[in-house]
Amino acid sequence: MNVESKESFVYNKYGRFTADIINKKGSWINQMNLTEARQQLMAFQSKMSAFQHALSLLNYDGDTSAPVGAAENRAHTISVLSEETYKLSTGQETVQLLDYLDSQKEQLDEKERRMVWLLLKDIRFQQKIPMDEYVAYQKLVVESQSVWHQAKEKSDFAMFEPYLEKMFSTAIRFAHYANPEMDAYDYWLNEYEPGISRAVCDAFFAKLRERLVPLIREVGKREQVSNECIKGNFDVPSQEKLAHYLMNLIGLDPAHVGLSTTEHPFTTSLGSHLDERITTHYYEEDYTYSMFSVIHEGGHALYDTGSANDLAFTVLDGGVSMGIHESQSRFYENILGRSKEFIQFIFPELRRLFPQALSDCTWKDVYRAVNRVEPTLIRTEADEVTYTLHVMIRYELEKRIMAGELKVHDLPGEWNRLYQEYLGISVPDDRHGVLQDSHWSFGAIGYFPSYALGSAYGAQFLKKMQETVNVSEALKKGDFSAINAWNREHIWKYGSLKTPDQVLNDTLQEAFDPNVYLDYLEAKCREIYSI
Amino acid sequence: MNVESKESFVYNKYGRFTADIINKKGSWINQMNLTEARQQLMAFQSKMSAFQHALSLLNYDGDTSAPVGAAENRAHTISVLSEETYKLSTGQETVQLLDYLDSQKEQLDEKERRMVWLLLKDIRFQQKIPMDEYVAYQKLVVESQSVWHQAKEKSDFAMFEPYLEKMFSTAIRFAHYANPEMDAYDYWLNEYEPGISRAVCDAFFAKLRERLVPLIREVGKREQVSNECIKGNFDVPSQEKLAHYLMNLIGLDPAHVGLSTTEHPFTTSLGSHLDERITTHYYEEDYTYSMFSVIHEGGHALYDTGSANDLAFTVLDGGVSMGIHESQSRFYENILGRSKEFIQFIFPELRRLFPQALSDCTWKDVYRAVNRVEPTLIRTEADEVTYTLHVMIRYELEKRIMAGELKVHDLPGEWNRLYQEYLGISVPDDRHGVLQDSHWSFGAIGYFPSYALGSAYGAQFLKKMQETVNVSEALKKGDFSAINAWNREHIWKYGSLKTPDQVLNDTLQEAFDPNVYLDYLEAKCREIYSI
């Protein structure tokens, strides 16, 4: 089979150089024509996107619809397709093509240069990982996620521990393969958010801590706002209607964005930004969990689907980094979604869907309730202000495990200790503690800090947006068109063409300053709690 | 990339014969060791099952969850993966391997012999189809299904017509490629149900017509039974509960069988019988549509998931033919699901789920209602007796189009004329006529007759089963274990190891006789309508 596939690949594009490839590896490339190579670059990415579509769909299905006993079956398929993808993306012909294009880069356009750079970056990484370890890791990711689901259900950390140990040890090993001189945790921080390191994060979190801890303390002294109007019994069919209402309101295109349910909500692109899936989880006792999940994941989906159409089926399709991604998701969820104007606008719809539960409430009650500040156990349910502390705990724990200062076995104890120390609360069991997030189960170590960074970027984007868009008026009318147009123009349409730094600098035209975010949080808090 | 993948495939298994493969095609096979070849046979099928898992999942997703605008994106991915699958399954190394094993078949065990036969059969077919036509067809299937969905919604046959024309012309062309001497429609009939031809179907349908037409006429003269107790307003969440109750009752394993919703219910295996998905469609005005869809698709899923576990990841996994498959699905749906005993057993659950709608009903009312005989427009909603006439119409139309006696353009008119002629009813629009079934949209031409054949097989299986299993008592207790054990022992566990003929002959130990089915139908009808 592979002889055939090689032949069709080579004969079609480069005529009679097949024998050269086999007998004198590399010599054929000298005869390659730049025009053909540029076409080949696009064909390669198109094929890669098909394999990635299949792999993403297998994972998405595993998280949304698949029966539990199918995990092993799925792991087998993911392992086979990952091996094919690995061969495709790191194969000799691909590397020769990209090296050739890289050597001709002054003749490439901006998009092609960025494609070649990004593809070579991944190849350089993959080349450093032994193939058997790469394939084993893909399989581990599938099994680990399945075990995490079960372990969380049973609140049984011991069940998940060996998988988590392998996840961390693999992260350390892979980082060392990729960049032996760099600290392993710095490596992953920089992977998720290029330019970020422990030094940057340490300084960033110190600044947040410096202003947020006293603020939370102040709030604690005031009378707590009521959350009665968001608690009760909210039937799932009505919550489903709310989800679709919100997706439509914030401007998601139903022809290209689907909604499913899962344990821990996430967003995924399947093949290209033309097929985006968001997920949610309905809790009958609180409709706002799903409501803000939908807006948060909707922010991710707006960013991804906002890529210029000519980026589809290339590595430039979809958002550039976790930080910029979270700047969009948390912008829609918190800055817009928890604003006074937005809550006032959607209140009639909430009342229509939940007439009994909301009969005695005003929009101001809902506004205050969804902005209530209160230390709690679950990150994804945390309020906007304490949220950063949840992230800080995960950052600290990851950093220590990656440095060898903390054992995975001791993680639950340390987790619980830090929740007591920073948030003053006791963790009753691991289901509500260390097992709550899916991230580590699929190897996203070094990802968490981007949630906090993204929040801070978002506040600074708002400040800039307000120079030309009357955001408050737009929200009052429930009209997202000007807001989305601004984001599309400055951020979304570029997909991964610009680096995160370029997105930030070109959009803000000033240095990143977390104080903008802290000013915004403080102002909101002071008003709600009359501080 | 392909050089690499060839190398890993060849070096790992056959040591230093790589150069031989490339320079003197075919010579390496002489040095192949039978033990290695047998292992290679299993490895090949395992890899194929991974690609087929991905392709099936892409199609399943398209039918259940995918946003409508993602069809083109999905078509692109399916086209790429189909090309890879085609290369894998018809590549030179595969063919050499299978030819070699075929030449040594007296040394293979029964399973291996059947695997090699089935794999070579597909290869012989695929070898005869030009690769560009094969890939184009896979893409056509995806687009055609998407257009059919929209055309059905709009009741716009003209929109679907060019796709359906291509479907029929491709079916004729592919059949001629595959077997130039055989009639194209006979070819496809025989593909779906080996051993079947126009001659067999003509005789079979004549026999059904001979006994069913007078029976339906008799029924028409009697007082119609009421269907009030199945019509009304049945909320979807309760119907979902009923679906899961039924899945559990008939013995589907929730760890390996998932349920989703779609337009036209179907069942699919993903990768192996360890991951089976059934689908349904909820109509609020009639809970029995979904109820019998679930039991019907559940019958398919029982058959597939009943394959012996050692058949997983081989071509022997899952049911052998459409006819045997329908014999199981329609056995559970009609023979068991519409029996007096079954309805009596589930009635308390129905009443619990729909207390208001069923307050004035008895189980006998439900039993009569779900066995009501009445010519209607939609095949999947037809009663057990008129159902065969719906199939007969499709058979006749397919046969004439394939023979060039009828144009696709004239299909709606002929469809409507035959519904008037056989069933005495007027078709109001194409949505309720020629556009109702999905089958033609994905190229299943020659499939329909197997529905009628399967029904007839099922009745004869029942007769045989009753020799050792007290089916009536089992249904009264809602205990499917003995029934399922009998089916597993005689039919399911073999997967595709036996031919349909072997399954039929070994199980029945007598010739197939449609009169058994007709006796069963007549007895039921005579009792319900006091004929």
Image (cartoon, coloured by chain):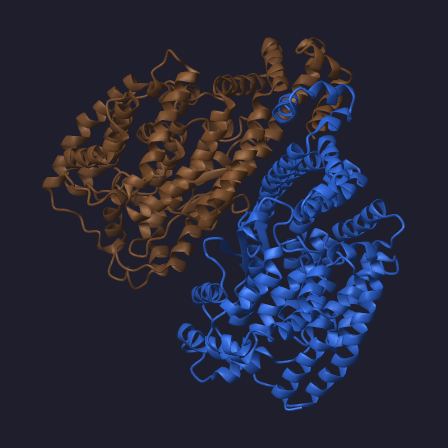
Chain colours: A brown, B blue
Residue B264 in view here: no
Query: x%, y% of residue B220?
Result: 69, 86
Query: x%, y% of residue B394?
Result: 76, 65
Q: Residue A90 lies in what quarter of the image?
A: top right
Check the image and report above or below for A96 versus A50. above
Q: Quadrant of the C terminus of chain B?
A: bottom right
Check the image and report above or below for B163 versus B502. above
The residue closer to the viewer here, A156 or B23, is B23
The residue closer to the viewer here, B97 or B235, is B97
Q: Does residue A202 appear to the left or right of B244 in the view shown?
A: left
Q: Residue A525 lies in what quarter of the image?
A: top left
Q: Does residue A476 appear to the left or right of B72 in the view shown?
A: left
Give the residue displayed 71% in from the left and 41% down from the top. Answer: B107
The residue closer to the viewer here, B113 or B484, is B113
Check the image and report above or below for B489 versus B9. below
Query: x%, y% of residue B148?
Result: 67, 54
Give the residue displayed 23% in from the left and 32% down from the top. Answer: A410
